[in-house]
Image (cartoon, rainbow, N blue to C red):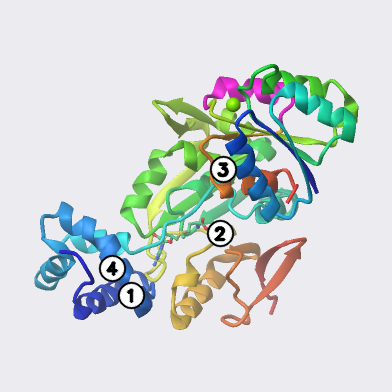
Amino acid sequence: MRALIVDDSRATRAVLRRLLHGLSFDGIAEAGDGRQALEELSANGPADVALVDWNMPVMDGLEFVSRVRSDTANDVMRIVMVTTEADADHMVSALEAGADEYAMKPFTAAVIRDKLALLGVV
Amino acid sequence: MMGSPDPSTSEFVRRLVHERSAIVIDASKDYLVQSRLAPVARDAGLGGVDGLVEHLRRQPASPLRDVVVDAMTTNETSFFRDAAQWEALATHVLPELIERRRAQRTLTLWSAACSSGQEPYSIAMLMADRFPRVVAEWNVRIVASDLSAEMLGRAAAGRYSQLEVNRGLPAPYLVRYFRQVSGQWEVRDEVRQLVEFRALNLVEPWPGLPPVDVLCMRNVLIYFDAMTKRRVLSRVHDVLRPDGHLMLGTAESTLYSDERFRRVEFGRATTYQRRTA
Ligand SMILES: C[S@@+](CC[C@H](N)C(=O)[O-])C[C@H]1O[C@@H](n2cnc3c(N)ncnc32)[C@H](O)[C@@H]1O
Ligand SMILES: [Mg+2]
């Protein structure tokens, strides 16, 4: 299984990487903002799942999700928003833009694992 | 007040919990007696766990008795715990049962150790989402019970923290079936009114239960001794409809405790049905 972690916090990326590693993901790519993440996708193709922060410089998570979903080549990639935004309005916007799941920070390992299980990724 | 309680204190607590709930607490878990009951003793102004037990020895019917049993019980749960079982319920068990009940138009589901309510509300949301016509037009009963008055209170209130709704609950369900109330998430009435809550101790009689189509008895038998487990399962056999399904926790099995059930496998999920005689 391949994953893409998109978050401007290096510490958060490291936590998520360790967590995914424990769930036996092999290819794990990282990006610090939406723009970098799009570049990663055009270089290596869609991953099985992307964990995407909302608030990032250059290009935020919501715009990244909309752009990903405008290209059907990415349809295979499940998207989980992982963000401090914790209200229903943000959730609805993310789901409408094409995110498949939504986890609120702070999260535990069980939260991410459950979300991936809901999407059938683990 | 610190340190371990008197050994006879732990012994008393273990016996009390077993008598009231059938839950077996291993002597190696005596540290739990201290860590879980110290706050109870403090709140009651009884000066430590030994003092609390002294109080219960003198007043066996004290309301603190149930508080102590509650505090010693594991209440851990989450929405849609063990995703594979819910998938099996949604795609195999329920569609098949609904097909078989077309004439009666009645369906009874029971969450028999519902803790803070995530399990019965998961059932209710699943029914409302996947089988809206059945919910609207049939007589669907979702019964949720637990031994613990405190847990039942939480379940009936239907209010959950961010961390609780983060676990296992699909985001589309969160936005559809909950509303945010001052930092908490509250189950909407349309879902809450599908569930009826009642106090029920699994080791005491089960009055007034109709025959059950889907019985969730998950992550509770595991705490019982073998004899109690057998006894409870034999009553499950009596209330379960012949074509109904029993769902257990993933670490539980009827295998060695009751030959009258057979396993039904759905991919990674297992349910149990009565063997036909
Ligand atoms: C670990 S929780 C399981 C919750 C839920 N069924 C699940 O699987 O997520 C165990 C629950 O069993 C309840 N319980 C323990 N002994 C019981 C008894 N004798 N009768 C009824 N409920 C009991 C506890 O109060 C607790 O809420
Ligand atoms: Mg950020």
Q: Nearer the viewer, mark 4 or mark 1?
A: 4
| Label 3 chain ID | B
Whether residue B141 is in magenta: the answer is: no
Tell me the number on the disc at residue B254: none
| Label 1 chain ID | B
Circle 4 packing at 10 Å, graded few (<14), some (14-19), many (20+), is many
Of labels 3 and 1, earlier in sequence is: 1
- Classify the position of ligand 1 by quadrant: top left, top right, bottom left or bottom right: bottom left
Q: Nearer the viewer, mark 2 or mark 1?
A: 1
Separation (CA) of disc 3 from disc 1: 32 Å
Of labels 3 and 2, earlier in sequence is: 3
Q: In which quadrant of the rendered view does residue B125 lie?
A: top right
Circle 3 packing at 10 Å, graded few (<14), some (14-19), many (20+), is many
Quick one: SS at disc 4?
helix
Q: Amino acid at mark 3?
A: Ala
Query: Which residue is tagged 2?
Result: B216
Q: Amino acid at mark 1?
A: His
Quick one: SS at disc 2?
strand
Separation (CA) of disc 4 from disc 3: 35 Å
Query: Which residue is tagged 3?
Result: B124
Q: Nearer the viewer, mark 4 or mark 3?
A: 4
Boundaries of the magenta span: A86-99
**Residue A85 location in percent, x, y?**
54, 25
| Label 4 chain ID | B
Quick one: SS at disc 3?
helix
Query: Which residue is tagged 1?
Result: B18
Q: Amino acid at mark 2?
A: Cys
* Callouts 2 and 1 in the same chain: yes
Depth order, front residue of B13/B134: B13
